[in-house]
Every structure is written in structure tokens, then in C-alpha cells.
Amino acid sequence: MNKIKIILIASTLEALLVLCVGCANLLLKPIYYFCFYNVLYGILFSFLVPLFLLWKEANVFDFLGIKTLGKKQIFILVLFVAFSIGGQIIPIVAKGGIIPLNLLPMGIVPLIMTTFFEEFLFRGFFQNKFEKEFGTITAILVSGLTFSFYHLGYPRFRTFEDILLLFAVGIGFATAYKFSGNNLIVAYFVNLPNAFVTYMLKFEQFPKMTMSSTIASIITLCIIVIVLLCLREKREKKGKNNAYG
């Protein structure tokens, strides 16, 4: 029953993500985009719902992999970032191409936010849950597959080649996560530089980044931080009460 339940939850969340991202990119007015992308896709379905479903775990933060980095984790992080970024930039530089760094500043905060949602859901929640029920290989494949399919919500990422490439990229993120000992911080910081470079090289495929999207992302990130701090404080109080009880 647990296996069927996690499959149904994953399928439902995946469909809702695609729907919300698709609506956000169809209704491009800032207020609509904020509601569908930041609030529904991000805060609700990628963050609060997984947190609610994981609340019975003994330590939800350990389950997700929100823990400190050791030497092994730093090595995995550097290795995967070098491979990912080098694989995109080196061929362009070798051909005399130019990396449009001027595009990056406006995309920094929105990409920081989106990367958090991706890693929290696809690695922290999906991969851990599927690994617990189906094993490591299945979990990595599901993590990569759900990561690639959610991009169907973005109109300019709907080609077979893009979905296949995103599946390979998702497998890379999932593998880095597993090799690091399921450390979400590693997966996040492997994904983030890749997101920056991909945005600069394929900016026409992304939603247009504006000052309003930066402000909306800052608000969203503040909400995330507040929720996480409140949850940590609640967990600590519960732990102290249990210790003295």
C-alpha cells in the first residue's frame, strides 16, 4: 500500500506542477505569475505539501538531507559542478564564443528560488521516498524523470531533445545527491551553477526575468526561511519536552 500511495502522490504532484508552471507561463502578468509560480507551484506543491507528508518522520530535516557538509560532500560537489559547468562552457569558449554574463544579474534570485523548490521536491522528497520503498536505482530514475517532465510546463522546453537532456541532467543531480550521502545541500549547489549557466546560454527558453520577478522571489524566499525556522524551533521544543518528560 505504501508503494501505491507514493506513486499516486508523486503522479499527482507532478501533474499539479506542470499545470501551475504552464498557467504561469500562459498568464504572464506579474500578479498571475506570482500566484501560479511562486505560491502554487513553489510554496504549496513543492514545499508545504512535502513538508506535511514528511511531518511524521522522526527528523524531517535529516530525512530531506539538510545537514552539514563534510570532506566527502565537498569533493562530490566540486566534482559534479566542474563536470556540469565545464561541459557547457568549455566547448563554447574553445570555439571563441562569448558567455553573456550581462544576463545573469536579473536571474540570480529567481533561479536561487526555483532551484530550491526543484531540489526540495525531486531530491529531498521524491528520491528519498522512492528509495525507501523501491531502492536506489529506481529512486534515481524517478528523480530524473519527474525533474525532466515538470519542465513540460515551460513552453520552450517541450521538445523531445530538451526533455531527454533534462532527464540526463536530473539523473546527474540525483546521483550527486546519492553519492553525497543524500545531502540536499550538495544537490542544491550542483544544480544552482548549472541553472545559472543554462539560463545565460539558453535565456530565450526561460520566462523573461524582470525586477518584479526578483522582488517576488525575495518575498518567496523569506517565507521559506520563516517556515523552516519555525519548524526547527518547534522540533527543538518538542525534543526538549520529550527529554524532560
Image (cartoon, helix red, strand yellow):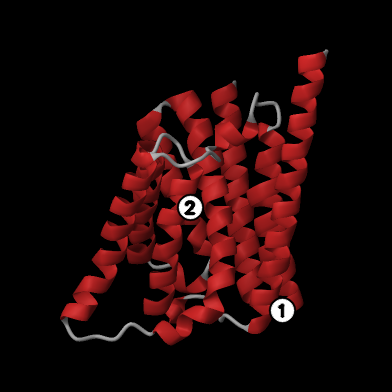
Q: CA distance from mark 1 to mark 2?
A: 26 Å
Q: Position of residue 120 (x, y in %)?
A: 56, 47
Q: In the rendered view of the protein, which quadrant contains the N terminus?
A: top right
- Per the rendering, the mark at residue 30 is 1
Q: Looking at the rendered structure, which numbered label has been put on residue 80?
A: none
Camera-near label (1 vs 2) is: 2
Q: Is residue 190 visible?
A: yes
Q: Secondary structure at mark 2?
A: helix
Instruction: Give the SS element for disc 1.
Output: helix
Residue ID at (56%, 55%): 116
Q: Position of residue 190 (x, y in %)?
A: 40, 55
Does residue 7 show up?
no
Identify the residue shown where x is 52% and y is 56%: 150
Q: Amino acid at mark 2?
A: Tyr
CA neighbours of label 2 inside 10 A, class few (<14), some (14 to 19), many (20+)? many
Lateral position of residue 204 relative to residue 108, left or right: left
Where residue 52 sits: x, y (%)? 72, 37
Neighbourhood count class around disc 1 (C-alpha, 10 Å): few under 14, some 14–19, many 20 upward: few
Residue 196 position (above or below residue 192):
below
Residue indicated by mark 2: 188
Q: Earlier in the sequence, mark 1 or mark 2?
A: 1
Task: Out of 43 and 193, give the one closest to the viewer.
Answer: 193
